[in-house]
Amino acid sequence: MAINHKTKKAGMVPSSRSNLCTTLFFIVLFTVPALFLLHTTKTISICSSMPNLPWSWSGDLRQAEFAWNHLQFSKSVPPPLPLKIAVFSRKWPMSKTPGGMERHAQTLHMALAHRGHRIHVYTSPPDEGNGEAGSSDTNVMPVIHWHEGGPGKWKYRSAWELFDKENQHEAFDVVHSESVALPHWLARNVPNLAVTWHGIALEALHSTIYQDLARGPNDSVSATFKIDTDGVIPKVLNEIRFFKSYAHHVAISDSCGEMLRDVYQIPNKRVHVIINGVDEDDFQDHGQVATKN
């Protein structure tokens, strides 16, 4: 009996090793594909913020978490549904001068107009304006509506009156505000209200923190550091509370889009990234100039 008992115990060793090997096999079997999927997801995220994407994409744009700049639309194929879009911008560039959030707005909405959408821009009179309200050619898109007043002096109430008149004639499908050009309390009842953020309070707070971290060990704290941090934190909290009231948010950087999703808790399908850029038709490579320099 004793001999049989020892023989039984000895026979259990290979069985235990076999079970261990089987367990390890299945761990490896399921872990490797999981790591591969995680690696693939990370790679796509990195590629989404780089030009010349090696992959194509199709689907609902509201679900896309990469910058829309990478998408290419066929110039020969019109959009499935042309929209009537109202744009509120404090200023509207009337020359080739680059830069500024107005240039971002112009580039975006000119492209939408070329796609067949009906764009109406509500803005302040240009520098050469005469202070009277007026509109550009209504047969050419985008249509520019200047409210009355001094050149470059933004009056959102006057712009709203012009918008309201056109909206009653034929309702807009989308209303788009460049930052807070159109106060939310004034347009809170407008459906499909979208906003482009050219800077949010949390970005300003990050900048202040990084500036302080960059100072040398013997450098004193900036005299405005406490004022800046104390003043911006309530702004961040206020933004978190009321940003959710907008139907859609356009961020001009990947980092701003991440903040809106992760910190401000805006659902992914309501946050869209369109990065600042330049019009390649206006800014082209001049080989001879580059060679001389």
Image (cartoon, helix red, strand yellow):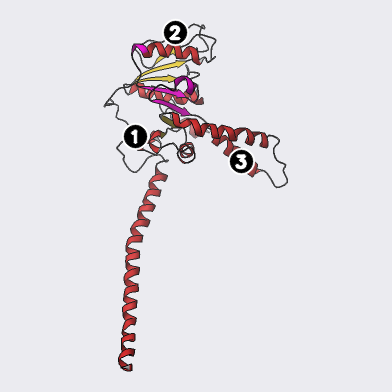
Q: Quadrant of the N terminus?
A: bottom left
Q: Which residue is mark 3?
A: 209
Residue 216 falls left or right of residue 28: right
Q: In this rendering, is residue 183 above or below 275?
A: above
Q: Residue at position x 47%, y 31% from top?
A: 243
Residue 136 location in percent, x, y? 41, 10
**Is residue 244 visible from the viewing direction of this image?**
yes
Q: Earlier in the sequence, mark 2 or mark 3?
A: 2
Counting other residues with Cα less than 10 Å from the Cα at mark 3, is it few (<14), some (14-19), or many (20 or more)? some
Query: Mark 2 to mark 3: distance in Å?
Result: 45 Å
> Which circle's residue, 1 or 3, is located before the other in the chain?
1
Amino acid type, callout 3: Ile
Quick check: is 55 in the magenta stretch? no
The amino acid type, in three-letter code, at marker 1 is Leu
- Residue found 67% across the figure and 37% down from its top: 226
Local secondary structure at mark 2? strand
Disc 1 marks which residue?
Answer: 61
Asked if the residues shown at circle 2 and circle 3 are in contact, with their CB atoms under 8 angstroms apart, the answer is: no
User: Residue 271's mark?
Assistant: none
Question: SS for tag 1?
Answer: helix
**Which residue range is magenta in the image?**
168-197
Judged from the image, the secondary structure of the residue bearing numbered disc 3 is helix
Relative image position of residue 126 (x, y in whole percent): 50, 13
Residue at x 57%, y 35% (from the top left corner):
204
- 215 or 288, which is in the foreground? 215
Mark-to-mark CA distance, 1 and 2: 35 Å
Kindly indicate whether the residue at mark 2 contacts the one at mark 1 (C-beta within 8 angstroms): no
Return the residue at label 2.
134
Q: Badge 1, how many Cα within 10 Å: few under 14, some, many 20+?
A: few
Binning the other alpha carbons within 10 Å of mark 2 as few (below 14), some (14 to 19) or many (20 upward) gives: some
**Label 1, label 3: how far apart the Cα atoms are:** 34 Å
Is 212 above or below relative to 278?
Answer: below
